[in-house]
Image: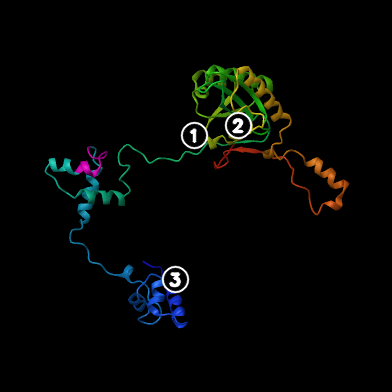
Amino acid sequence: MIHPSDRRLAVELIQEANQNGARLAKACEELNISVRTYERWVSAGGVQEDQRPHAQRPIPKNKLTEEERLAVLEIVKKKEFVDLPPSQIVPKLADLGIYIASESSIYRILREEKMQQHRGQSKRPQTKLPEGYLATAPNQVWTRDITWLKGPVQGIYYRLYLIIDLFSRKIVGWDIWETEEAKHAEVLIKKAVLNEKTQGAPLVLHSDNGSPMKAATFQVLLEKLGIQSSYSRPRVSNDNPYFEAVFRTLKYRPAFPYMGFKKIDDAQKWTAEFVHWHTHEHQHSGINFNRKAVYERARLKRPERWAGSTRNWDPEESVALNPMKEKLTKNN
């Protein structure tokens, strides 16, 4: 079915081509319509709209009556049939000496009533929004994750545990172990809390769903430290994007030993150097580098070189984790 506006445009193009010497059949052929179709469109003057949507069609003789349709809906809601598809309902009814409608008719009714997939205990899948938080200062929201570093031979890896502050991007805790265990995560969070002196202050720790992060002993420790736990959705790395950025920065450093570390001590030494660089030298574009004063001094010294205002170096007033959530939890 061709939209009325497209039909009018096609007629205009055909008539224009015909008036400029093109044969009518060839002009119609270019638009993949027949001459008969074109003549039908313009037979009464102007361009006729498609009349098929307005056609009165007779009711099929085999159409189910409204009573039969209601009977189908009543049957599919019964306890013994509510979890079965029509392909099993019809034979069961036949065993009871009952025929009410064909399988295809029951399927069609279920589709129309949006009951084909969820009639029994199954529920429609709900889109789970990620947990969102807003940090307006350091030590309000931390995020943590684990990445694997190649060892001396294929199949051997060291686990790098990292904790970063959402607002400042500072690495507040890190360590490397040969395994992923809750006890390692417990040691690391204790060290980070002591180093940053956050004991007793409201703090959120966001992480993925790995077993070390969700172990019962680790949860008990967080509760004792007054830390609220938060988790990404399963198999959704985008719920912790700041950590993905840190890991990419780490593994794309020019000196990163992509062939692997010979010993765990080598991995610890290299990571210590990376953490120092990341904390004291790396320019974090996400927090605008904090270079506003430098630009203001440069402008005052040579104002003729500046056509307008300086680049916006204002530091971010807040940093959001998963801001797509309608209401962000603000931690003060």
Q: What element carries label 2?
A: helix
Residue under label 3, please give it. Answer: 5
Residue closest to the far left? 97
Q: Which circle marks residue 140 in the picture? A: none
Left or right of 146? Residue 309 is right
Q: Give the range drawn in magenta.
A: 80-89
Quarter where residue 284 is shown: top right
The type of residue carrying mark 1 is Arg
- Disc 3 + disc 1, Cβ < 8 Å: no
Q: Is residue 60 above or below residue 208?
A: below
Asked whether residue 60 is drawn in magenta, I would say no
Residue closest to the far right? 301
Q: What element carries label 1?
A: loop
What percent of the width, then of the height, locates residue 185? 56, 20
The type of residue carrying mark 3 is Ser
Q: In this view, does 209 lie above or below 134?
A: above
Q: Which circle marks residue 247 in the picture? A: 2
**Which residue shows up at 86% across the image and 47% down it?**
300
Q: Which of 162 and 33 is in front in this view?
A: 33
In front of the other: label 3 or label 1?
3
Q: Nearer the viewer, residue 151 or 317?
A: 151
Residue under label 1, please give it. Answer: 233
Counting residues from the N terminus, which is met first, the one under dot 1 or under dot 2? 1
What percent of the width, then of the height, locates residue 108? 27, 51
**Which residue shows up at 50% across the image and 24% down it?**
214
**Which residue shows up at 50% across the image and 28% down it?**
209
Q: Distance between the residues labelled 3 and 2?
A: 54 Å
What percent of the width, then of the height, locates residue 145? 57, 28
Counting residues from the N terminus, which is met first, the one under dot 3 or under dot 1? 3
Left or right of 252? Residue 296 is right
Q: How far apart are marks 3 and 1 (CA)?
A: 47 Å
The quarter in which the C terminus is drawn is: top right
